[in-house]
Amino acid sequence: MTKLLLENILRFILLILAQVFLFKNTGYYNLVIPFPYIMAIMLLPVRISKGLLFLIAFLTGLTIDAFYDTLGVHAAACVTLAWVRIIFMNLTIQDDDHDSISPGIDQMSFRWFLIYVFILSFFHHLTLYLLESFSLNNILSTLTSILFSCIFTTVLIILFELIFYRRKKR
């Protein structure tokens, strides 16, 4: 349990630092902006309490908001991601013996993880971009940015997960 806690804290710190110092200025004409910091929320243990999950998501988003000078947009998007994560876990995982596992390629299948990452990043990006633009004037460019950023973020998260891939434990 202590190893899992330390692993999640280290992952959180590394992903926040990477987002702030590396990916903040990475993008393609403001059309594609990666947000791999959401991986910190996605890879939390499956049976984490809902209150703690929402608190971690809110604090993660608030941390990114502090560096991006956005007033709660990332916090709202991260809380939305946590809400969709709870729904996705309830729909796809039926067993109660998943207390200590984290949703990753080493624990779940690659297909499940790909769908999981894409759906969660889509809802995160949807909330983020719609709150950021707060207008329907350029809805086509906003939807394009949502889709391309979601795909790019999904690819980055899958690559990060494959770099640290371990054999199945179950």
Image (cartoon, rainbow, N blue to C red):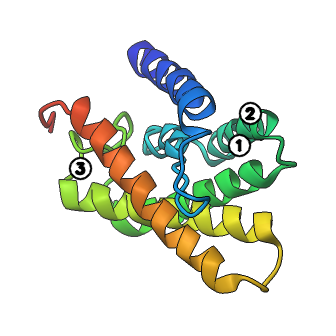
Q: Judging from the image, what secondary structure is the residue with disc 3 in? A: loop
**Label 2 crowd bin: few (<14), some (14–19), many (20+), radius 10 Å:** some
Q: How many marks?
A: 3
**Label 3 crowd bin: few (<14), some (14–19), many (20+), radius 10 Å:** some
Q: Residue 129, image x and y in percent?
A: 68, 66
Residue 94 vertical position relative to residue 43 in the rendered view, above or below? below
Residue at image x 41%, y 69%? 91
CB under 8 Å between discs 2 and 1:
yes
Residue 8 appears left or right of 132:
left
User: Residue under circle 3?
Assistant: 108
Q: Amino acid at mark 2?
A: Thr
Q: Residue 1, image x and y in percent?
A: 42, 19
User: Residue under circle 2?
Assistant: 63
User: Residue under circle 1?
Assistant: 61
CB under 8 Å between discs 1 and 3:
no
Q: Which corner quadrant holds the C terminus? A: top left
Q: Residue 69, image x and y in percent?
A: 83, 41
Q: Judging from the image, what secondary structure is the residue with disc 2 in? A: helix
Residue at image x 49%, y 71%? 147
Q: Along the line of sight, which residue is nearer the eye, 9 or 151?
A: 151
Q: Judging from the image, what secondary structure is the residue with disc 1 in? A: helix
User: Label 1 vs label 3: CA separation?
Assistant: 26 Å
User: Disc 2 or 3, which lies upstream in sequence?
Assistant: 2
Residue 109 appears left or right of 44:
left
Task: Place residue 160 in its image quadrant.
Answer: top left
User: Disc 1 or 3, which lies upstream in sequence?
Assistant: 1
User: Label 2 vs label 1: CA separation?
Assistant: 5 Å
> Among all residues in the image, which is located at the extreme front?
29
